[in-house]
Amino acid sequence: MPPAAETVLDEVDGEEGKGGPTRAPGSPRRRPLSPAVAGPLAAALLTAVLLALATRLSRSYPFGPVTRNIVDLGQQYLPFHAYWRSFLLGETHGDAFLNWNSGFGAGFLGDIGTYLSSPFDLLVVLFPADRVELALYVVTAVKITAAGAAMALLLLRMRPGPWPVAAVLGSAYALSGWTFDLGATVPMWLDGLVAFPLLCLVGEWARTGRRPVVGPVVVALAWTANFYTAYMATIGAAVVLLVRLLTAAETAGARQRLAGALRAARGVLIGIGLAAPLVVVVFLGTKAADPTPESTFAPAAFTELLARFLPATASLASPALFIGTPALVLALTLPFNGAVAPRVRAGWSAAVVLVTLSLQWEPTHLLWHAGASPNGGPYRQAFVLCGLLIVAGWFSAARGVPRPTALLAGGALLGLLAWAAHGSVDIDRWTYPALGVAAVLALAAALVALPHRRGTAAAEPPAPSPASTRGLRTTARLLPVLAVVLLVAAQAGEAAVTGKRIVEQQRDEVAWSPRIGPWHTAVAAEVARADAWPKHRTEPGEVPGGNDVLIVGGQGADYYSSLTSEVTSRTLASLGFGYYAKGRHPVTLDNPVTDALFSIGTRVRSVPTAPVRQDALPRATVTVATTPVPPLVTVRPAKRPATHPGDSAFAEQERLLGADVYELPAVDRAGRTVSARCPAGSQAWFWAPEYRGGATLAGEPRVDFEGKPPAVRAPMRALGTVPGSGEVRIELSPERPVRLPRQPVGCLVRARLDSAVRQLTATGATEVRATGHTVTAELPPGSTGTAVLAAPRISGWRCAAGDAEPRPARAYRGLVAIPLDGRANTVTCSFRPPGIKLGGAAGLTALLALIATGVLHRRAGRRAEPSAEAPTVA
């Protein structure tokens, strides 16, 4: 390697170069900005500007009035970040173990590890409560910007070269199609985008035997921030390390390669061990989560695969591989670039081809996704391939503009790719115009830069005149600058257009939630005013979006997480609650029986004052109702009273309540009419979880149901008051073939419910205290039977009566239960996330291994110093 290249390499890796120019005595000290700093800074600035521009062009918040809250961004990540801010500021009822605001009590440490454990997420505390959307946008932008900077740093570390080109390629990686199509709407996955270049950098350190302590710490941060995409990034980094071990001059021998691989494996294992306290909890939480239907992988058609390399394409059924035409052309020139060593060309070209094929083969698809094909978006690992393409492009351009033959070959491959993709359904009307303009600008940049490349390699010409010398120098300085400007214009314009079009397509095609506005503010104010936890729960009711309670407060049923327990989902569904996301998003049920079962004493109801729109803040009329309910902990007799038999939600509510409160009539069905007879004045309820359409009780307004199995289950709903005749006549207006349960109608007799509530209140806890993840209840003296805590019996609950030793809680129809023998006057239940002990032990072991590694490395360095300083013996 030339001395100048060694100097740049040392600067990139944070060390002072040993071959640089010396400063003349008396001259002012000047420290030029090193490529290691200039490249990442420029990449970060370019990325931030282009992301903001794409957001502005799409008229999305915060640079426009239109909501960004599509699908999970609005129903998971925004509410979780709102709750995270409140949690960090000490404003929640729960703690890091338990979240009382969701799902009637849900484990929180797993959600932290899944959604909120990125260091970037701490930024939410810098924003006021009514600016959480802005906070989440900033978090998203900072992650994407950091990814661009990290990639630029990696490129300069792998091979010295022009830092402006590294900056452009770093930005191309950060603003890939994967980022716009997936990452920007699933911010937790962006940590994998940041992790990939950083883990590759860890591989570089391991390959050269450097930074054995910092490397595992970086791995630990990546796996803690988001272990799901960090797992994919680790596989990608392993591919990069393998290619480097086989092609880099520094690791030419088999022993060096093996040593480098072993050092990398050690660093990864220690790093994952350090992250184990969170990773193990998340892993076990995933095992206990409500299972989603099995997904069978179907590879994308060849045409669709090729189309995703082009700008302005969006789809969940094919991998998002756009990195920009200039970056893609550079990657395509690598196999033909004679200025690059053959082994390097072969190694990186093979890596790109094999990883591309791995996206399309089911065994490797399962390997990328840890053995389980995901529901929705089967190409979540595509950011790794985008990164490999960027690295390939850098190796082709680091020593200068590829030769004309290589440029022609790469351009021909791009043209062939664009032609083969022209029949894809993912092609947008902006795709080929954006591609054409970017290709022209990239070609212009290459033509401008080529004379400079030839001039630096040409033989020394005859001495020119002073005037011509100045002109040549000016031209020599301006041509590279102009080339960079053209390159930036090509990359920037295409990225901005792609970001704009993908956002616009998503808003038209997928579910969305409105921005946080006066509706949420009004509900939050009423919830805060009525909150009486743990005396009873306050249910905020339906608010636009999902995970509503995390935004407005309260202790309701709404909960949307990848870790939603199967116990929670199945228990609530059996009682007539509805859900979305195949069971992982239970929603509220406005029913007086379930309110009594879960001690919901205050219920907030809100009705929008106008249709909810994408480009307007939602407003609503808010009302509050308070009713007597049993305490959070009740006592059930040892002998359970007889209730209606059957498998309907009405019967299940009665079994859990311990009293008959419904009339369950025989139902006659004729066509679209359902008929039955009930006591006059009772309240008619309709339970049809798979039904989609309207149901109208004679003389009452229509009530809509949204069942769409298996993804959506409609909640039980009230149709109105039974008339004096006792006749219940329900007219159905289905949107698809009707499938009703055996017992779809139940008529609630309120006097019976009131009597049951008084009985449970009289025998229930006289006082309930809740602190963080622990509940303590004082019971009437001599209580026997079973104490029931109105919370789903998810794994992790341990309870004790009196001074007894805590044991894993029992279950009472899906709720937490503690046996009573008449001698204990108190019960205490505490929640501890499963896996916390195992993860803690693994983390401690990894920490000790890290310390040992550092000590051994320091000792080895000290032993090497005397031998390095000893004089050479002739």
Image (spheres, grey):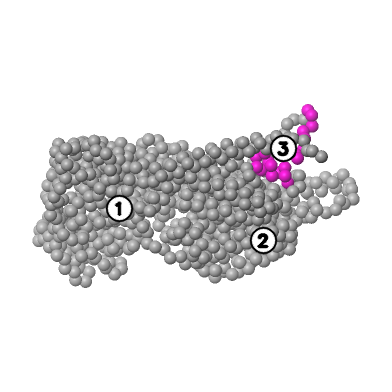
The answer to whether 652 appears left or right of 31 in the picture is left
Q: Which residues are magenta?
A: 5-26
Residue at position x 63%, y 56% from top?
243
Q: Is residue 359 visible?
A: yes
Q: Where does residue 309 sit, x and y in percent of width and height?
A: 57, 61
- Residue under label 3: 868
Q: Amino acid at mark 2?
A: Ala
Residue 415: quarter of image: bottom right
Question: Extreme top residue here?
Answer: 26
Front in this rendered view, residue 850 or 387: 850
Q: Is residue 130 visible?
A: no
The answer to whether 568 appears left or right of 259 in the picture is left
- Residue under label 1: 567
Q: Where does residue 689 sit, x and y in percent of width and height?
A: 27, 61
Sequence-wise, the earlier of marks 1 and 3 is 1
SS at mark 1 in the image = helix
The number of callouts visible is 3
